[in-house]
Image (spheres, rainbow, N blue to C red):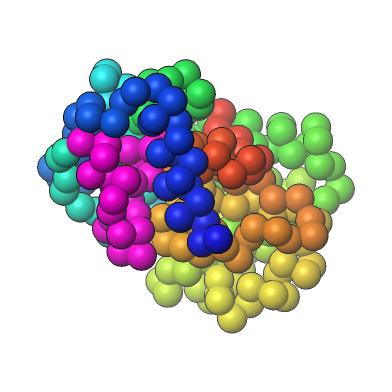
Amino acid sequence: MNIYNELKERLKNIVLENNLFEDQVFITTKSLNPKEAIGETKRKDFPILNGKENMIEAKFKGSTGQAFTSSPSIFQGSLSEVLTLDLNDDYNKAIFIATSNAILKYLGLIESTVHCKNEEPELCGEKHLNYLKEFYSDSKIALVGFQPSILEHIKDNFHVRVLDLNADNIGKIKYGTLIEDGKKDYQSVIDWADIVLCTGSTICNRSIVNFLNLNKKVIFYGTTIASAAYLLGLKRVCFYGK
């Protein structure tokens, strides 16, 4: 089964079990600007700060779900409408993911569906370092998605290779590490790595399918993948999300 159809069916079952079908879910009518999304950060090379990512936000009964996407969209309607969206469309996919995050947060099934802000994205990199040192010491790590704070914190303690889809980053040296092509260099990097540390925003651009069912440990990070990780049984870390 297509994983997006699987996500839709599993969310539909939860909605039915909790009698939520006709409740209203609201998506913000614009993308959050960088300050709204991550606050004032000391580091200025987070992807959202240079326009390479956008964030949308869903509100449901006082709970908030967010999703990083390159395809932000506008929506307001019932859950039954969300569950009929065509998830082959990237705009609809982002709406669905943000909404799913809000619903499961409301039901108490997941945490950390709102991105951290201000100094926290920087502290997040240090938390990743400590986590990896505790559980995966001496591992070769494939970092999927250029996340500057994580990269700078882990590069001196682990062998790291980075995959990214942003043409502005590919082939560049960032924090002493070559940023490799997420498509052309994918197999080489994955074969090399012991651990894959993968951005959760891959759920919105469909590249997540390349990181499922690998014969090695895959850890997703961030808020975007919160509900999908729960529904699909994926390993996720998010240290400062709300």
Q: How many marks?
A: 0
Q: Quadrant of residue 212?
A: bottom right
Q: Residue at x 58, y 58 (%)?
A: 144
Prevailing secondary structure of the magenta residues: helix
Evaluate whether residue 17 shows in this view.
yes
In the rendered structure, the answer to whether residue 148 lies left or right of residue 134 reads left
In this rendering, the answer to whether 226 lies above or below 70 is above
Which residue is most to the bottom? 184
Is residue 59 visible to us here?
A: no
Name the spot of residue 36 as percent of width and height, x first: 24, 34
Q: Position of residue 109 (x, y in %)?
A: 51, 24
Quadrant occupied by the C terminus: top left
Picture coordinates of residue 41, whole percent (x, y) = 37, 36
Please state if 78 lies on the left or on the right of 94 as rendered: left
Placement of 32 over or under 240, stated as above or below? below
> Considering depth in this image, is 120 or 24 the residue closer to the camera?
24
Placement of the N terminus among the 4 image quadrants: bottom right
Q: Residue at x 52, y 56 (%)?
A: 3
Q: Is residue 223 above or below residue 218?
A: above
In magenta segment, residue 151: no
Q: Quadrant of residue 69?
A: bottom left
Residue at coordinates 27% horizontally, 36% vertically from top-left? 79
Question: Which residues fall within the magenta stretch?
Answer: 78-101
Pick whichever, 34 or 234, lies toward us: 234
What x and y, as percent, mark residue 129? Answer: 68, 38
Q: Nearer the viewer, residue 58 or 223?
A: 58
Name which residue lies at 63% across and 60% down.
Answer: 211
